[in-house]
Amino acid sequence: MTIFSVQSTIFSRASVVLLSSNGFKRFSFASSFSSSAVYSPPLPKMKKRRYPIVSAVDIGGVTISRNDVVRDDDPTNNVPDSIFSKLGMQLHRRDKHPIGILKNAIYNYFDSNYSKKFEKFDDLSPIVTTKQNFDDVLVPADHVSRSLNDTYYVDSQTVLRCHTSAHQAELLRKGHSRFLVTGDVYRRDSIDSTHYPVFHQMEGFCVFSPEDWNESGKDSTLYAAEDLKKCLEGLARHLFGSVEMRWVDTYFPFTNPSFELEIYFKEDWLEVLGCGVTEQVILKQSGLENNVAWAFGLGLERLAMVLFDIPDIRFFWTSDERFTSQFGKGELGVKFKPYSKYPPCYKDISFWISDSFTENNFCEVVRGIAGDLVEELKLIDQFTNKKGMTSHCYRIVFRSMERSLTDEEVNDLQSKVRDEVQKKLNVELR
Ligand code: DAH
């Protein structure tokens, strides 16, 4: 059991078994919008929107316009405006934000233990090819993560990266051999306090040459696995202090052997990261057939929620000063002091589902209408009648992190949800 099932890794064995990802949990508005975001003039409809209408964002000096990412002309495209508006926010590059503070603390660990030999990348574009995101890291052709239900597609060959592993091969090909890649990653997912369709990951990668392991007398894989474990145990101690840890064998398409590191924290085992010894094919494809390497990937929200005591993943996106003012540069582990919450408002919706219905699609419709005002979406009842029709009843919890919602506003949101699910999801309201 882990404390949170906060999003972190998707490629472990469980996701391979559950090819139909419906209901399967995979595995993070800040103080101001990214200084690099360019806004179109306010539209009359603006007031009702739960997210800003961004016309373009700047990522690593490249301007990406909305029309290139949110496209009506491509049937594969499933990126909504609410997601486009998150591109370029780069919470991990804000030194006073919990995600940025955690990134910097991990940087410090690597800088001081490896004399700054790990190169750092935190500005690579989250728009990548399917080759980068999947093929280059050996994700099987029928893996659930490739589906339109799980990943945001810009077009049939371009996606919003669903993990920072998407950059491994490209950086190896460019000659980098020790690096950390931090970035925002995107996954279509359910809605609750630990799941949000955008979160942040850090990838670590380290290549060894024959002289490294020859001296040790160990075979290359064992040498890399031992080095990896030593490095990550040190990192866990750097972040959490002297905690109990354990290694769990697992499966990732890109590593063999593969492990997960868990730490015992607040009376429960918490999965901290996924890692392993890189599959030789990946190295070979980058001209490194005589080498061996290790890699890891960790979810920053998951760790930040534990380290800073942050109870809801939506807090990372709030611009409420009562949240943002609690954190300072370099202050790892300051405990978040909750401020009074605004009241929730519960609304139920029931419908007969169709064969094509998926919970992720439903979540996306609700998020598209209510944005961050939706706190949770729970299936509270389901049954199949004699005719074989299946009914789902969902409870939607509306709550703002910033103000009290009026009845009128919530009724309006709920009525829009009812209209849109019928139109977009081919369900029959009950
Ligand atoms: N990319 C994995 C995920 O998002 C995490 C991961 C696991 C990255 C193992 C790695 C690794 O580099 O070796 O689920």
Image (cartoon, rainbow, N blue to C red):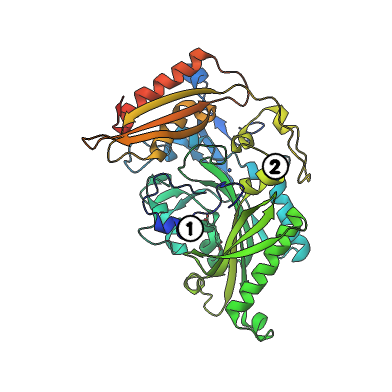
The amino acid on which the numbered mark 2 sits, given as a three-letter code, is Pro
**Mark sitting on residue 11:** 1
Find numbered disc 2 in the image and state the secondary structure of the residue it sits on. helix
Q: CA distance from mark 2 to mark 1?
A: 26 Å
- Taking the image in four quarters, ligand 1 sits in the one at bottom right
Find numbered disc 1 in the image and state the secondary structure of the residue it sits on. loop
Q: Is mark 1 within 8 Å of ligand 1?
A: yes
Q: At 76% across and 45% down in the image, what residue appears?
A: 333
Q: Position of residue 76 (x, y in %)?
A: 34, 44
Judged by depth in the image, the label closer to the viewer, 2 or 1, is 1
Query: Would you identify the image quadrant in which residue 230 lies?
Result: bottom right
- Horizontally, is 343 left or right of 151 in the view? right
Q: Is residue 43 visible?
A: no
Q: Are marks 2 and 1 in contact (CB under 8 Å)?
A: no
Q: Position of residue 341 (x, y in %)?
A: 65, 25
**Counting other residues with Cα less than 10 Å from the Cα at mark 1, is it few (<14), some (14-19), or many (20 or more)?**
many
Q: At 43% across and 25% down in the image, what residue appears?
A: 348
Judge by depth and name the residue closer to the eye, 424 or 167. 424
Among the two numbered marks 2 and 1 on one chain, the one whose residue lies closer to the N terminus: 1
Q: Position of residue 116 (x, y in %)?
A: 74, 63
Judge by depth and name the residue closer to the eye, 216 or 240. 240
**Counting other residues with Cα less than 10 Å from the Cα at mark 2, is it few (<14), some (14-19), or many (20 or more)?**
many
- Horizontally, is 37 left or right of 15 in the view? right
Judge by depth and name the residue closer to the eye, 25 or 281. 25
- Check disc 2 and report the residue beneath it: 98
- Horizontally, is 334 left or right of 354 in the view? right
